[in-house]
């Protein structure tokens, strides 16, 4: 087992190093030089050279890269063009919003998607099955931002059931936020009105963000359960006279849900892409909105830092999922 | 029997190529999802190709006499079936002309992604060894960056322009095709016909290029159909974020949606129409692609 984990960890090193090289090169390939961006159009040659010297841009490339790597390891991603604050501070400040949104969305996707896929497989060929397949196909083809607007129009603008934008009502500006996770903050400070308000603000963006993962999880669960239902050991268990509840719990779900966990781990990237669009539609002040705003402002340090952090998290999450899978299913370790 | 004749016999024997597709086509013609998908695609292609001829008005000229004052957005009328946009332009015409833009971006970016992926996958699956390992690490790396974020980064690097957007979406899809083709080639290399060709003394390069590679392309083609749908959605997403690249005078569904969002409360049709257009175009390719995958997958054969 340890060898399996070490082997998986070793694969990470070239991937992460390669990524850092790619992002280092990316900044250099961007149109316009950093000195030009700082000084504007009318900079003199001497000024440009001075800035280049100050920023170390006159050094050989590999030295520049090593310095960049040294900074990245210390989580120093430079200064945001949008706010003139360190990129990492901006990300940490906005992280709780995106985390709350992403976790809620993933929760919706799993809680709805897994049972849906399970019952579709159990009632294979019925209307429920066809509806699940068709629904999931439509779910993956609706652009996240379009769905977000439709939800906003129907449930916020027309029906007024949910708030339109943001994380908290403006009248609650004086509410305390000890953790930055607004739902948790409401609970911790005992402010039930703020707690409820934070949840109401999460509902629509979380549903929009959950749609594609939900569709994928339902499909994968359905396929996995169908596969397992055809296995000999399920037939054996049934013919032994075990109750259907026991067969379902011990034999069907335990085997079918394994591949599903891997797929849930893979949803992280989709959630991050989706968060950029969803947070923009709902003016939800998270990391995704910050990245969307980085495009028109050409805030490349923020984009670079965000890509590095997200890719690293993605790789680590999948490592954890892989290792967990290896722990549960010994067959995986041999591969 | 000479080597050439023997190899030809193998090629004939492995020619489930045509057979598989003929079988698949028969199954597709009985599958309602596939038929709906094909109809949607046909409609999309028809509208995109004959856009100039179908659009009742030009995309740019506003019909100013319909606007009854600032901020007034006329809804559907007999003259303008979907109404006008916030600048007094005919919405239906803009949707129709936008189809061509979507098709163009979708097809070209798919080609970029598919060709890049096939080259990488073929080299990795064919050469093997350290090259294969290197390509697979590159693929891991590319897949670690969420697709939209990856596309944003590349589009920012390449600067303004439609080509930048198409390349960005294409590059994002390269690892998907590369991994798929490589995996399929590794599996096909163990197939009986490849063994037969190898034992006849056919050169390795010829076995791989002449037998293994063509027999590995089926899932790549299926994936291509599905990727066309995601490419259309991704292009709309980039346009929504301000990276449309296209000439602002050319209607683009994603940008139309982004530009009309501030009128959502008073004129929701300005958001709904381009949104539905994206969904229907993407749904057509998804339905056909998924049905194709099912039809070609031996697991689903009864």
Image: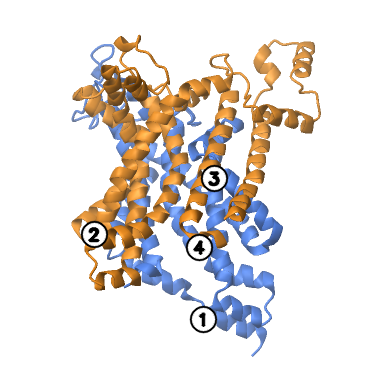
Chain colours: A orange, B blue
- Relative to A295, say whether B187 is above or below: below
Nearer-N-terminus badge (3/1): 1
Are tags 2 and 4 found on a single chain? yes
Q: Are marks 1 and 4 in contact (CB under 8 Å)?
A: no
Helix, strand or loop status at disc 1: helix
Q: Secondary structure at mark 4?
A: helix
Image-based side of A254 in relation to B197, left or right = left
Position above or below: A22 against B33: above
Residue annotated with mark 4? A331
In this rendering, the label closer to the viewer, 2 or 1: 2
Q: Earlier in the sequence, mark 2 or mark 4?
A: 2
Mark yes or no: residue A221 visible.
yes
Q: Which residue is mark 1?
A: B13
Q: Residues within 10 Å of mark 3 (few under 14, many from 20)?
A: many
Q: Can you give x and y, in whole percent of width and height, for residue A177 in the image?
A: 40, 16
Q: CA distance from mark 2 to mark 4?
A: 27 Å
Q: Chain of mark 3?
A: B
Image height of A166 relative to B240, above or below: above
Subunit bearing disc 1: B
Instruction: Residue B106 in the image: state x and y as whole percent.
Output: 46, 44
Structural crowding at the residue carrying mark 4, measured as other residues with C-alpha within 10 Å and reported as few (<14), some (14–19) or many (≥20): few
Q: Residues within 10 Å of mark 1 (few under 14, many from 20)?
A: few
Marks 2 and 1, Cα distance to the nearest angstrom?
49 Å
**Which image quarter is the C terminus of chain A in?**
bottom right
Q: CA distance from mark 4 to mark 3?
A: 25 Å
**Secondary structure type for disc 3:** helix
The residue that mark 3 highlights is: B143
Viewed as shown, does residue B73 lie left or right of B108?
left
Where disc 2 sits, the SS reads helix
């Amino acid at each position: 087992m340890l060898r399996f984990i070490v082997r998986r960890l070793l694969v990470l090193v070239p991937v992460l190093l390669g990524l850092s090289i790619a992002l280092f090169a990316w900044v250099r390939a961007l149109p316009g030089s950093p000195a030009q961006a700082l000084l504007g159009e009318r900079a003199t040659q001497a000024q440009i050279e001075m800035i280049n010297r100050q920023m170390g841009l006159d050094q050989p490339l590999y030295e520049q890269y090593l310095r960049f790597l040294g900074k990245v390891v210390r989580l120093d991603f430079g200064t945001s063009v949008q706010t003139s604050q360190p990129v990492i501070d901006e990300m940490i400040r906005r992280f709780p919003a995106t985390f709350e949104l992403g976790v809620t969305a993933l929760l919706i996707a799993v809680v709805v998607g897994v049972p849906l896929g399970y019952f579709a497989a159990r009632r294979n060929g019925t209307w429920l099955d066809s509806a699940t397949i068709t629904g999931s196909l439509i779910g993956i083809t609706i652009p996240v931002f379009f769905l977000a607007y439709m939800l906003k129009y129907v449930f916020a603008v027309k029906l007024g059931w949910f708030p339109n934008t943001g994380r908290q009502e403006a009248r609650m500006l004086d509410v305390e936020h000890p953790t930055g996770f607004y739902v948790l903050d409401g609970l911790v400070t005992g402010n039930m009105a703020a707690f409820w308000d934070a949840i109401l603000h999460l509902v629509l963006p979380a549903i929009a963000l959950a749609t594609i993962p939900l569709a994928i999880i339902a499909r994968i669960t359905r396929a996995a359960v169908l596969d397992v239902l055809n296995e000999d050991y399920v037939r054996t268990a049934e013919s032994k006279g075990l109750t259907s509840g026991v067969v379902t719990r011990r034999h069907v779900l335990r085997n079918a849900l394994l591949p599903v966990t891997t797929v849930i781990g893979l949803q992280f990237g989709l959630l991050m892409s989706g968060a950029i669009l969803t947070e923009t539609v709902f003016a939800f002040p998270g990391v995704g909105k910050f990245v969307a705003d980085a495009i028109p402002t050409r805030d490349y340090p923020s984009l670079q830092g965000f890509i590095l952090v997200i890719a690293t998290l993605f790789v680590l999450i999948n490592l954890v999922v892989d290792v967990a899978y290896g722990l549960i299913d010994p067959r995986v370790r041999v591969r | 029997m000479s080597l050439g004749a023997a190899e030809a016999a193998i090629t004939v024997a492995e020619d489930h190529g045509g057979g598989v597709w003929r079988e698949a086509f028969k199954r597709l013609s009985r599958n309602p999802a596939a038929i709906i998908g094909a109809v949607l695609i046909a409609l999309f292609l028809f509208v995109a190709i004959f856009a100039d001829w179908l659009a009742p008005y030009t995309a740019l000229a506003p019909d100013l006499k319909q606007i009854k004052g600032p901020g007034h957005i006329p809804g559907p009328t007999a003259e303008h079936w979907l109404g006008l946009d916030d600048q007094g332009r005919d919405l239906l015409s803009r949707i129709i002309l936008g189809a061509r833009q979507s098709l163009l971006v979708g097809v070209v970016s798919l080609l970029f992604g598919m060709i890049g992926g096939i080259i990488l996958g073929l080299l990795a699956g064919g050469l093997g060894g350290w090259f294969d390992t290197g390509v697979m690490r590159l693929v891991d790396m590319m897949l670690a960056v969420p697709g939209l974020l990856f596309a944003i980064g590349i589009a920012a690097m390449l600067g303004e322009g439609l080509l930048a957007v198409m390349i960005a979406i294409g590059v994002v899809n390269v690892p998907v095709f590369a991994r798929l083709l490589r995996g399929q080639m590794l599996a096909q290399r163990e197939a009986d016909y490849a063994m037969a060709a190898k034992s006849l003394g056919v050169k390795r390069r010829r076995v791989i290029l002449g037998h293994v590679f063509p027999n590995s392309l089926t899932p790549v083609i299926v994936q291509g159909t599905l990727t066309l749908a995601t490419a259309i959605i991704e292009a709309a997403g980039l346009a929504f974020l301000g990276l449309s690249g296209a000439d602002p005078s050319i209607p683009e569904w994603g940008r139309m949606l982004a530009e009309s969002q501030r009128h959502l409360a008073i004129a929701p049709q300005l958001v709904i129409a381009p949104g539905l257009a994206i969904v229907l175009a993407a749904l057509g390719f998804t339905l056909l692609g998924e049905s194709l995958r099912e039809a070609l997958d031996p697991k689903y054969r009864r």
